[in-house]
Image (cartoon, rainbow, N blue to C red):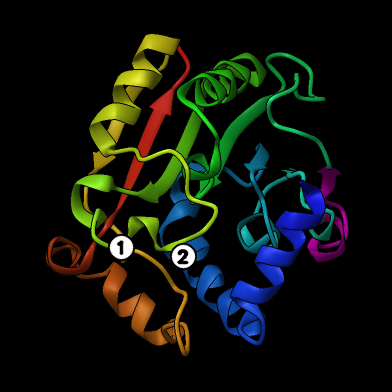
């Protein structure tokens, strides 16, 4: 399974890694950083090539992914946990301030696997800690959602929010249309274009195909 993940990522993102990192530098600095204090302990769940965790400013940073390439992509100082997310996570209870995940939940094989991830996130977060979840919203991208070989679990902002609340989270913010569906293509968008897009919420309603959900542990 880990070898399959490595192959999929290398083929999908070959040649675009540097530009994707620049785009994520904008996304973290101009948007996601507001939910992450610089003295926080943060986990990037399904970290992939570590674009988020490498760029977010935080005191302690963890990356969890089964993909063996994740360790090679992680910046110095990031603790990489190479494991199956379906097993208990190798992190103490109530030890983190933020769990972030981007375009990961749709790769899980079932709602049971998603429930496990939400339960583990709730366990490792301190009271008041937050889960930040970004992913394709099936309500707005059903025509292209299945174009990716490793997509298994269709989710919407509504179904994810319901699942989080059933698990014990309190929903703080839901953006049903945020980023476009994917950066995959001939060329990812330029950092300047992404920065401008983030400043224009009305544009999100036109081109946004991904949800963004913020949920807090009581």
Q: For the residue carrying disc 2, how many other residues have a C-alpha within 10 Å: few (<14), some (14-19), or many (20+)?
A: many
Give x and y (percent) for residue 197: 28, 74
- Label 1 or label 2, whichever lies nearer to me, is 1
Up-down relation of residue 18 to residue 84 (above or below)? below
Residue under the point 54% across and 68% down: 24
Which quadrant, please, contains the C terminus?
top left
Give x and y (percent) for residue 138: 27, 46
In front: 178, or 141? 141
Q: Where does label 2 land, which residue?
A: 27
Drawn side of residue 47 relative to residue 152, left or right: right
What distance separates the C-alpha of mark 1 from that of mark 2? 23 Å
Label 1 sits on a secondary structure element that is loop
Give x and y (percent) for residue 183: 44, 73
- Label disc, if present, on residue 144 of the rendered structure: 1
Please check the rendered image and state whether residue 35 is part of the magenta-colored stretch, yes or no. no
Tell me the magenta residue range: 71-81
Up-down relation of residue 218 to residue 91 (above or below)? above
Residue under the point 43% across and 38% down: 153
């Amino acid at each position: 399974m880990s070898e399959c993940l490595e192959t999929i990522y290398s083929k999908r993102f070959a040649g675009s890694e540097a530009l994707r990192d620049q785009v994520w530098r904008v996304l973290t600095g101009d948007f996601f950083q507001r939910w992450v204090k610089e003295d926080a302990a943060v986990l990037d769940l399904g970290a992939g090539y570590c674009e988020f965790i490498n760029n977010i400013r935080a005191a302690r940073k963890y990356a969890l992914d089964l993909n063996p390439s994740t360790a090679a992509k992680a910046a110095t100082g990031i603790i990489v946990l190479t494991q199956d997310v379906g097993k208990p996570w190798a992190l103490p209870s109530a030890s983190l301030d933020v769990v972030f995940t981007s375009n990961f939940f749709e790769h899980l094989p079932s709602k049971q696997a998603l429930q496990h991830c939400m339960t583990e996130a709730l366990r490792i977060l301190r009271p008041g800690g937050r889960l930040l979840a970004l992913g394709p919203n099936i309500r707005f991208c059903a025509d292209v959602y299945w174009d990716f070989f490793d997509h298994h679990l269709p989710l919407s902002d509504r179904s994810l929010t319901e699942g989080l609340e059933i698990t014990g989270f309190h929903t703080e913010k839901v953006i049903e249309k945020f980023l476009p569906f994917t950066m995959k293509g001939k060329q990812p968008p330029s950092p300047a274009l992404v920065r401008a897009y983030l400043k224009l919420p009305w544009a999100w309603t036109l081109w946004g195909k991904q949800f963004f959900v913020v949920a807090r542990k009581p």
